[in-house]
Image (cartoon, rainbow, N blue to C red):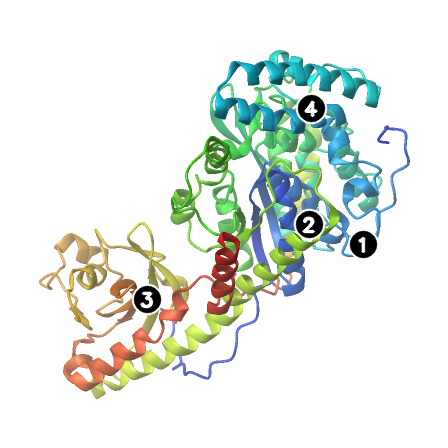
């Protein structure tokens, strides 16, 4: 943190509204067939005029990210109207089921319920029925579809996968090369030392495309691999995306071809979601350099997929509920830690009932889910990028003006910063909004270490409304080493706790922090003023929410109705 | 359905995002990616060196232009 170069103008509550940020980095979470809701997310970005500067994804999120990077818009992936070729597969005379293999799909759909029943009942007779049904179904599917190839159960043993992935890879390669052809038919030789045999990551480095990052899991070393134009410039994009979505035992472990003389066969990869299903960290460094280059603050928008409602042990955990829940937890549950460490991330949770393996999705279900996702994404992004910053900034400016009134006349020119912090699940205070010195605001205040005000707020019991913190080596709550960590300009802090009522008990929800280059202790000399300031701080509780209050209420109501 | 010899439909401009990178960012990323290509493909290092030289000149020109707008 540094002192400001110039005296800040006194801001007031009527500060002009900020424009919607034009730029963002965008991450798409994996989720199998449920990934179709990302089409709604893309529509929301277009409607709000938000332009991605780079995209990343794992698994199904990688497919969406690759298509978007190559220029495909939401309406190219799923049409808005009710025409026959309503999705990108049908427009290209394909279907997800054909790419998987019709007979293997049919076999899976028929065998899965039997498998679950056999596991639940545990009877040998059911297992025998399973084997018999599998044999008959496989034979029937071969007759019906007249296709050869390895039967899925054998493939599972030999290739470790129920479905092959080669057809899907070829289809994606066709889509990507067609987009590059449309932009520049000479892309294979443009600015390259040699002709490109397939679409490589370096081929997407062009102002008409978006930089792409794809996450896959290296199953040989057990590490996460990020594919992009700097780490893997000559690797095949389609191969990397297929590797990223290779759910173990569903699709085979995949190698990613590299267009380079003498390149050794690389390791085998499986689903990127195994290690990072919402790969926000993959964009953090790119975001930092773009912020420096463009002189802007650029958020990372992470579109996550979740089931509507929550499970709180209200249902008995039968095997058919337990297994999908284990799968879902493995795929979706490993992101909270990484997200908490990266500031400036807006997580948009898109709820959907669509099962991960519902690849034979019908048009109406898909379009309904996309419309819901678009509505949700618009509400959250509009709240986080426009409404909340404007309203909170005005309220914080008014609060700072009120604090200034309590200063001694000699300190009337003090520089102030007011910041609103929200208490996270990790017991840290993360900045929600701030006014003035915005770029300098601490992203996170740790309650356990540096940040005496935050600790004092938590230590306060009962209705201790206002916590005053004088700064200096001899100040209460502050050690000498902590004092050295303070920014040079900071000489006074005031903290105001914000509580919420939950089930009749009061709970700390956040903190309003005012910082200044002068001492602020005189501000709270008047009890009436102190109580007034605490009341104003408490009024900012709605600004701690990630979504507008009515949107949250709608989501909760829908979850309740589903439970009923 | 789904054999490889079928004719793919043409791309409809209305179905493309139309998103474009800001020129300064696009030029900078191209430069960094070409450096990475040179690092990963030493056999063609000279060809990439020529590309880098041309791109560096482009970047120098871009540095003199007005900054990209947008953002908060």
For discs 4 and 1, the disc positioned in front in the rendered view = 4
Q: Are marks 1 and 2 in contact (CB under 8 Å)?
A: no
For discs 3 and 1, the disc positioned in front in the rendered view = 1
Q: Label 4 to label 1, Cα distance in Å?
A: 30 Å
Q: Label 4 to label 2, Cα distance in Å?
A: 23 Å
Relative to B1, A284 lies left or right: left
Which of A151 and A1 lies nearest the eye of the viewer? Answer: A151
Numbered tag placed on residue A82 in the rendering: 1
Q: Secondary structure at mark 3?
A: loop
Numbered tag placed on residue A127 in the rendering: none
Q: Secondary structure at mark 4?
A: helix
Residue B32 locus on image (x, y percent): 60, 41
Work out whether mark 3 precedes mark 4 in sequence or the reverse, and give the earlier one.
3
Relative to A321, A21 lies left or right: right
Work out whether mark 3 precedes mark 1 in sequence or the reverse, and give the earlier one.
3
Q: Are marks 3 and 2 on the same chain?
A: yes
Quadrant of the rendered image containing residue A69: top right
Residue A5 locus on image (x, y percent): 38, 69
Residue located at (75% from left, 30% from top): A99
Residue A218 locus on image (x, y percent): 52, 24
Q: Chain of mark 1?
A: A
Res. A144 in view = yes
Q: Badge 3 is on which residue?
A: A3
Q: Label 3 to label 4, Cα distance in Å?
A: 68 Å
Residue A43 locus on image (x, y percent): 67, 57
Q: Are marks 3 and 1 in contact (CB under 8 Å)?
A: no
Numbered tag placed on residue A107 in the rendering: 4
Residue located at (38% from left, 68% from top): A437
| Quadrant location, the N terminus of chain A | bottom left
Q: Label 3 to label 2, Cα distance in Å?
A: 55 Å
């Amino acid at each position: 943190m540094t002192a400001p170069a110039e005296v800040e103008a006194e801001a007031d509550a009527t500060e002009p509204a900020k424009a919607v940020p034009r730029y963002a980095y965008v991450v798409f979470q994996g989720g199998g067939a449920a990934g179709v809701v990302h089409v709604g997310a893309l529509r929301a970005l277009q409607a709000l005029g938000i332009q991605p500067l780079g995209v990343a994804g794992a698994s199904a999120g990688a497919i969406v990210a690759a298509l978007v990077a190559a220029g495909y818009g939401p309406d190219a992936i799923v049409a808005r109207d009710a025409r026959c070729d309503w999705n990108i597969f049908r427009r290209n005379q394909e279907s997800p089921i054909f790419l998987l293999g019709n007979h293997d799909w049919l076999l899976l759909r028929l065998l899965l319920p039997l498998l679950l029943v056999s596991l639940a009942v545990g009877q040998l007779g059911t297992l025998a029925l399973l084997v018999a049904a599998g044999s008959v179904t496989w034979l029937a599917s071969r007759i019906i579809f007249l296709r050869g190839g390895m039967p899925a159960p054998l493939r599972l043993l030999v290739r470790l996968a129920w479905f092959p992935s080669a057809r899907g890879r070829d289809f994606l390669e066709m889509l990507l090369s067609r987009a590059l052809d449309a932009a520049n038919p000479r892309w294979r030789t443009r600015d390259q030392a040699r002709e490109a045999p397939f679409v490589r990551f370096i081929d997407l480095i062009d102002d008409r495309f978006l930089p792409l990052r794809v996450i896959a899991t290296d199953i040989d070393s057990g590490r996460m691999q990020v594919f992009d134009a700097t780490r893997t410039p000559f690797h095949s994009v389609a191969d990397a995306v297929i590797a990223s979505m290779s759910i173990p035992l569903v699709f085979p472990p995949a190698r990613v071809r590299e267009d380079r003389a003498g390149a050794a066969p690389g390791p085998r990869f499986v689903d990127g979601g195994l290690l990072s299903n919402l790969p926000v960290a993959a964009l953090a460094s790119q975001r930092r350099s773009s912020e420096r280059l463009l002189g802007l603050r650029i958020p990372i928008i992470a579109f996550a997929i979740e089931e509507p409602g929550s499970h709180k042990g209200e249902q008995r955990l039968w095997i058919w509920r337990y297994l999908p829940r284990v799968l879902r937890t493995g795929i979706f549950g490993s992101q909270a830690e990484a997200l908490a460490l990266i500031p400036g991330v807006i997580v948009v949770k898109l709820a959907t009932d669509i099962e991960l393996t519902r690849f034979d999705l019908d048009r109406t279900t898909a379009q309904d889910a996309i419309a819901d996702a678009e509505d949700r994404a618009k509400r959250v992004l509009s709240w986080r990028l426009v409404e909340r910053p404007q309203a909170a900034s005005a309220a914080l400016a008014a609060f700072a003006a009120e604090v200034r009134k309590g200063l001694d006349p000699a300190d009337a020119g003090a520089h102030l910063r007011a910041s609103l912090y929200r208490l996270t699940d990790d017991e840290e205070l993360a900045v929600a909004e701030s006014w003035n010195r915005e770029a300098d605001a601490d992203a996170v205040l740790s309650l356990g270490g540096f940040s005496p005000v935050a600790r004092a707020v938590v230590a306060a019991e009962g209705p201790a409304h206002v916590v005053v913190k004088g700064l200096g080596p001899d100040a209460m709550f502050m050690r000498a080493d902590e004092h050295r960590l303070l920014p040079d300009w900071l000489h006074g802090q005031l903290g105001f706790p914000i509580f919420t009522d939950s089930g009749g008990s009061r709970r700390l929800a956040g903190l309003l922090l005012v910082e200044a280059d002068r001492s602020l202790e005189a501000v709270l000399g008047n009890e009436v003023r102190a109580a007034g300031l605490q009341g104003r701080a408490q009024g900012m509780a709605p600004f701690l929410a990630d979504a507008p209050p009515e949107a949250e209420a709608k989501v909760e109501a829908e979850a309740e109705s589903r439970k009923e | 359905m789904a054999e490889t010899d079928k004719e793919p439909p043409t791309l409809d401009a209305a179905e493309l995002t139309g998103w474009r990178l800001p020129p300064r960012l696009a030029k900078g990323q191209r430069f960094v990616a070409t450096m990475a290509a040179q690092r990963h493909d030493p056999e063609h290092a000279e060809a990439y060196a020529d590309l880098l030289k041309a791109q560096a000149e482009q970047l120098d020109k871009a540095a003199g232009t007005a900054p990209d707008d947008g953002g908060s």
